[in-house]
Image: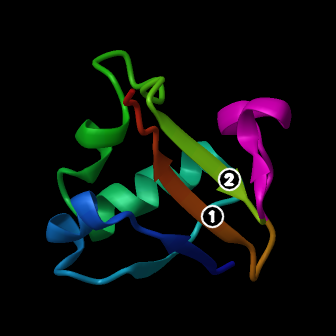
Amino acid sequence: MSVKVLIPTPLQKLTHDQPTIDCDGANIAELLESLEQNCPGIKARICDEQGQLRRFVNFYVNSEDIRFLEGVNTPLQDGDEVSIIPAIAGG
């Protein structure tokens, strides 16, 4: 199953400047492993030392925030689009 992952600009140096990556996974957790295999080092940028998603990185599946779905257990289907969005703070 192929899922399109939209990569934010700050992480594109890990994807050879590619703004999208096609990965496999039945859920977000499996997608993260596939993404790490394709782009070594990216998981450390979006997950903490315990392997949990960093709180300042948001994941959306087809425009739905996974925090309001099933988190890393959110199921994925062929053709889904996953967006990785770093939180922006300021004042």
Q: Left or right of 53: which side holds 48?
A: left
**In the rendering, at what x and y percent does residue 19 appear?**
37, 80
Q: Residue at x 26, y 41 (%)?
A: 45
Q: Left or right of 8: which side holds 75?
A: right
**In the rendering, at what x and y percent does residue 27 appear?**
69, 51
The mark found on residue 74 in the picture is: none
In this figure, which residue is indicated by the disc labeled 2? Answer: 60
Q: Residue at x 52, y 70 (%)?
A: 5
Camera-nearest residue between 89 and 1: 89
Camera-nearest residue between 70 and 19: 19
Quadrant of the rendering where the C terminus is positioned? top left
**In the rendering, at what x and y percent does residue 51 appear?**
40, 25
**In the rendering, at what x and y percent does residue 34 appear?**
44, 61
Question: Is 28 colored magenta in this rendering?
Answer: no
The first of marks 2 and 1 along the sequence is 2
- Mark 2–mark 1 Cα distance, whole angstroms, equals 5 Å
Report crowding for label 1: few under 14, some 14 to 19, many 20 or more residues within 10 A (C-alpha). many
| Residue type for callout 2 | Tyr
State the SS at label 1: strand
State the SS at label 2: strand
Q: Residue at x 63, y 81 (%)?
A: 2
Region in magenta: 63-76
Camera-nearest residue between 18 and 90: 90
Say if 32 sits above or below 54 in the image: below
In this figure, which residue is indicated by the disc labeled 1? Answer: 82
